[in-house]
Amino acid sequence: MKLPVLLAVGHLIIFSAIPTFSAETQQGKLAGTVKDASTQEALPTVGVVVKGTVLGAMTDLNGQFCIPKIPAGTYSVEAVMIGYKTAVIEGIRIVAGKTTTVEFKLKQTAIELSPVVVTASKKAQLLQESPVSITVVSSVDLQQQSEPSLDRVLQRSCPGLEFKGREVGIRGSTGYSQGAGSRVLLLIDDSPAIAGDTGTIKWDIIPITEVQRVEVIKGAGSALYGSNALSGVINIITKEPTQRPETRASLSWGFYSKPYYSQWKWTDHRLDFHSIDLSHSRKLGKSSVLISAGRKCSDGYSQNGGYQRWNLFGKLTSTFSPQTRFTLLTTWATDNWGYSTQWKGQDRALEVPDEYRNDKVLSNKFNIHCSFRQVVNSQLAYILKTYCLKTYWKNKFHDNGDYANSYRAGGELRAELLATERHSLTVGLEGVYNKVESTMFGDHSTYDPAVYIQDEVKLLSTLKATLGMRYDTHWVDGNSIEDQLSPRGGIVYRPSESTSLRASVGRGFRAPSVAEMFTQTKVSGFSVIPNPDIRAERTWSYEIGMNQLLGKQLMLDVALFQSGYKQMIEPKSIGSGEFQLDNVTQARVRGAEIGLKGQLWRKFLSGNLSYTYIDPRDLTLNQALPYRHRHQVLTAISLNCRAIRVGGDFHYRSRPQKAIDFLAADERVAHYVLNVNSSLKLSSRVNLLGQISNLLQYHYTEVPRHLAPIRNGSLTLRAKL
């Protein structure tokens, strides 16, 4: 089916539904309160949903909510909140012209779960009802760490993620591909945030102090999200503005230890880092606003490894009526940081070659996104989104002055339709436009229009199926290069509240970035040759899994998975010191993941343990894919006693099986990294955090010829003013 036909069908489904249901006149109102069952305190930000409709509301600071324009009838109403057991009241009768009142009393759960996630199906659903594996990094996880950037927190908190420097892969999807396309899609409040030139993630675009939680979806997500979601999706959910005035401050200072080996010492100065973040939130009429600013500076632990970063963040939410919500989010970040492609030598691992000592990169990022949600009636809601990410960087190298200026702009129209009592449809149209002006890549543009549809079918009270597909086309410089139809299917069986069995299959694709197609440069002795004939990567991903509550204190999650890649893009050596990116291989990555998390003795002891095994194979050459870790272990533990908390985390990643061809002589080692942290609650509004990262001073590399961070310690003061 061609794109114009699919677009027409999408328009027809979305807009023909509006008048069909707009004739509802016999309506009533539901109002009530939500309280903590133990303390009887009002609970704010609780989601209250009328099941079988798209209607819902969130409680205010007094725990109160109101949902108007509910068609007369009898309903079940659900209340959900992080850290509390979901509550459902059955048989609530809505009478035309009248207000029905209810009261929810929520019980705290022994396990800190996020009961509702939004990324897996582009709309809210229970975590246990998702047909794919999801890891949620909660606000508790974020508050217990004082890392300067979000990627470091994810590396310590999320099983199956692998970081090569700042490049991320999920379950062995990515080896060494610095600055040339991400197989993981980053979203900020459900809107894409991928650089238009390189197709990579800019982690510093969102200040970690303004992140509420992070949802990580593992497996091909192209059926809903298109290109870049080849192996998964990372969705950053930002904090909501408060209705009462609130000012927050975070001050941090830290230092790097001396190198373990005396010959690695490169300076007599103390190397430290510090940061300051300030934010303010308040209500303004029918709107609420959150603004923040921050500055981070570091001497770096290695020569030419320092940086200076500034960021601004703003979020505005307006609720014109219970059925209408508008959100505007904007971020800006600038970064001036030292750069080098390699160390001076393995015996001088913290130094860079003399000619690189003053090499710098200047970069600026600006992101803006708008979202408008309108509930038309009890069966239909639509969401309109627009976004734009502008990135600029310039090399200030001794031998290279390349720069790139890029824009990534897009929009999406999505409808959520309850077609019948058992069918929930999600239909959407989307388009993304990239424009690049660069000395390294040339001047190019790409355009990616798409249409998608998904149907969630409730087959039985315990069995739900998900079926969907997305059609994408990829245009480069006005020419249609290729297209992709990405189907998706999943099933969830819940024989009891404590057991959830899932299975899913999906097709994914990733169009090559402008950088992968057109890079032509020479830096640090390496020459990169353009390859305009490179084609999109494609994959089929499969997973079966189980989520099981063990009593009230423990949760077990098990998954078996496999992804088959065609036309996988990897660096290829084409001569002495020359390489290019090309569709070099067909590959298969399969494995298993098991995780256990829980809390004991009224949350005095909490922790988690996970193990991920992957078997990454190059099927073309019948050998292991380069620079992947076959085994990964993550574990964390926390002791909580009133105002004091002490914790730690440990991660192990096995030695990569295979080196990169043009760096084959480099030594590769396993990773053993231990971090410890603590916090002291000085008052109800002031917390003091301490952290020591890489406590054992273990030396390893995430990317070749770059030593990963050595031992460092920090103190952070957080206060509500």
Image: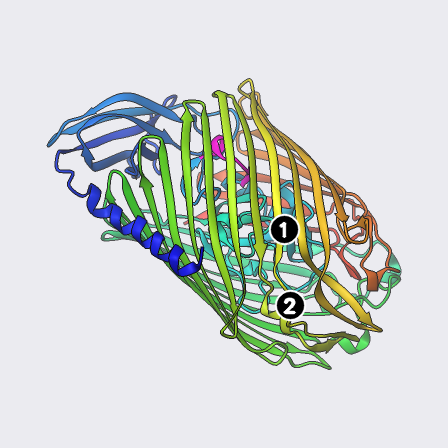
Q: Say left or right for 364 vs 354.
A: left
The residue under the point 60% across, 49% down is 231
Three-letter amino acid code of the residue under disc 2: Glu
The number of numbered discs placed on residues in the rendered structure image is 2
- Please give left or right for residue 138 compared with residue 240 in the image: right
Residue 683 falls left or right of residue 638:
left
Instruction: List the residue tagged with mark 2.
Output: 516
User: Quick one: label 1, few (<14), some, or many (20+) residues within 10 Å?
Assistant: some
Residue for point 65% across, 58% down: 166
Q: Give the farthest residue toward the front.
A: 1
632 shown above or below 461: below
- Horizontal side, residue 55 vs residue 235: left or right: left
Task: Please state which amino acid type lies under the numbered disc 1.
Answer: Arg
Decide: is 100 above or below 574. above
Q: Does the magenta stretch include residue 128?
A: yes
Report how far apart the C-alphas of labels 2 and 1 lie in the structure.
26 Å
- Image coordinates of residue 412 in percent, x first then y, are 39, 57
Task: Specify the label residue 152 is tagged with.
Answer: 1
Give the position of the N terminus as an image quadrant.
bottom left
- Give the extent of the magenta segment: 126-136
Q: Residue at x 43, y 61 (%)?
A: 431
Of the pair 306 and 286, the residue shown nearer to us? 286
Q: Which element carries disc 1, helix, strand or loop?
A: helix
Q: Residues within 10 Å of mark 2 (few under 14, many from 20)?
A: many
Residue 116 part of the magenta segment: no
